[in-house]
Image (cartoon, coloured by chain):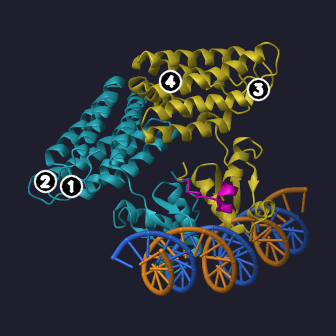
Chain colours: A cyan, B yellow, C blue, D orange
Amino acid sequence: MTTRTKKSGPSIRANDRIYEEVRNGILTKRLPPGQKITEELLAEQFGVSRTPVRSAIVRLASDGFVEITPHSGTVVKRRLPGEIAEIYDVRALLESAAAGLCADVREAKDLSDLEQLHGTMEEIFNAAMTGGTAQIEELSLLNKRFHERILKSCRNATLMESASRLMEIGFLINTYVTFSREEIGRSMDDHRKLITAIQSRDVHWAECVMRSHILGARNSLMKDRVGSLGSDAAGTC
Amino acid sequence: MTTRTKKSGPSIRANDRIYEEVRNGILTKRLPPGQKITEELLAEQFGVSRTPVRSAIVRLASDGFVEITPHSGTVVKRRLPGEIAEIYDVRALLESAAAGLCADVREAKDLSDLEQLHGTMEEIFNAAMTGGTAQIEELSLLNKRFHERILKSCRNATLMESASRLMEIGFLINTYVTFSREEIGRSMDDHRKLITAIQSRDVHWAECVMRSHILGARNSLMKDRVGSLGSDAAGTC
DNA sequence: TGCGACCTCCTTGGATCCAATTCTGGCCCG
DNA sequence: CGGGCCAGAATTGGATCCAAGGAGGTCGCA
């Protein structure tokens, strides 16, 4: 995770802009793993010198998005397939704990936010079911927000940060992996149950649902098939 | 965590040297929280230009050791007291899982390494008991190695990395916090039990011992007292 | 023809200079 | 006497230039 430097007011460092942009490119797979990144080229594309580009690349490397080999070059980091399972295992650990804590404190604002996020997701999903084209990217984003909202509500910034970090790297892998419509439906059911568990302050239930939710996604990802929905379904967890 | 750039052979980048050195200074509290860091000064101290210093600082910021405010300066990051509890809570989660996994696979090399580390710690501790001056720093380092060894043996690099990251930040806080001789003794008992649990492949026991071990340390740290041993005892977990 | 050494080009690492911004201290005015 | 404003100094951000190291191609030799 990057300790973001405070961007106060109108002064945006080229540094930050480039970091953000390139990171985005990597997450959306516009810059695929193994893609070579040259400072010169980026500098040209952004209309700046190599200096801010270098800063951005150093940060990207520090955050695990790219890999620098001295005097040779920088490439978008390749992730081994096994890492997917690892990441999801750790996410299951951290996020189930977060869900439990969230159920324990159960603040009204947390619940209403989760309800709203889930409601929007259901709308989009149902629209897709009734013939509309699935806004998969939108669903994926909302899903991420849902998980992040639970992490935030556990009142442990360290836990939140550790898990967020893993989520981002995870998305870096599974964005193009497809899930079936059934799997997405099950995922949304999980979210529903999660909200209910938190609502009823059932710490243990919340933990178990979250763990099951994430390990389920892990299992789906492990049997790398192409999915029965479209060709562009996105991660469900 | 920093994705360390491969330092192949004899070519060491000034970049890396400075990062390592400053990070070390922060961990040993030679550079206390809130300490201002100027590129110019560091450059002078290391006999290089500001360029590699800037790279190092960017990495340090990315790894959460310092905080950059644009055009203003860089300071060693201050950690709120509450973060200690947070970090130990998450460590308890991650490392107990690692201990369980370690007990599950139970490879001979893992056990012998742990035995050896523990043996050395006992020697130093006993020497201190019989009148010798306690090598607190040495004990602290061995303790860190012990925990890292368990993390390594769980065969999940992601888990290891997440936990290591937290351990380092933790040491950043509690290096000067003192533990009593009794507490250090209890901590070593925990390690002993941990080895036994792993030896007998008792996954659940290993998990519980580790969790208790870390939460115990968390509790000790929370009642920030000065301790009954010397004035320089170090973290026990 | 295959292997190895060398050489050139490409890319990054570091140094230095200039620009932009923010902080500080002093001064003026109310 | 206090607060706000302005200017200078200090410090970081960015640009450009030069150096160092590595990868790939080519030529020569066995």
Assign the magenta stretch its main secondary structure: loop
Residue B98's place in the image compared with D16, above or below, is above
Q: Same chain for labels 4 and 1? Say yes or no.
A: no
* First in residue order: circle 3 vs circle 4: 4
- Horizontal arrangement in the rendering, residue B135 relative to residue B207 (left or right): right
Q: Position of residue B49 (x, y in %)?
A: 74, 69
Tell me the number on the disc at residue B111: 4
Mark 2 lies on residue: A229
What's the distance in space between the residues labelled 1 and 3, CA to CA? 58 Å
Q: Residues within 10 Å of mark 4 (few under 14, many from 20)?
A: many
Q: Is residue B14 magenta?
A: yes
Mark 1 lies on residue: A233
Comparing marks 4 and 1, which lies closer to the viewer?
4
Residue A12 visible here: no
Q: Are marks 1 and 2 in contact (CB under 8 Å)?
A: yes
- Horizontal arrangement in the rendering, residue B184 relative to residue A110 (left or right): right
Q: Residues within 10 Å of mark 3 (few under 14, many from 20)?
A: some
Instruction: Tell me the magenta residue range.
Output: B4-19
Mark 3 lies on residue: B135
- D3 or A167, which is in the foreground? A167
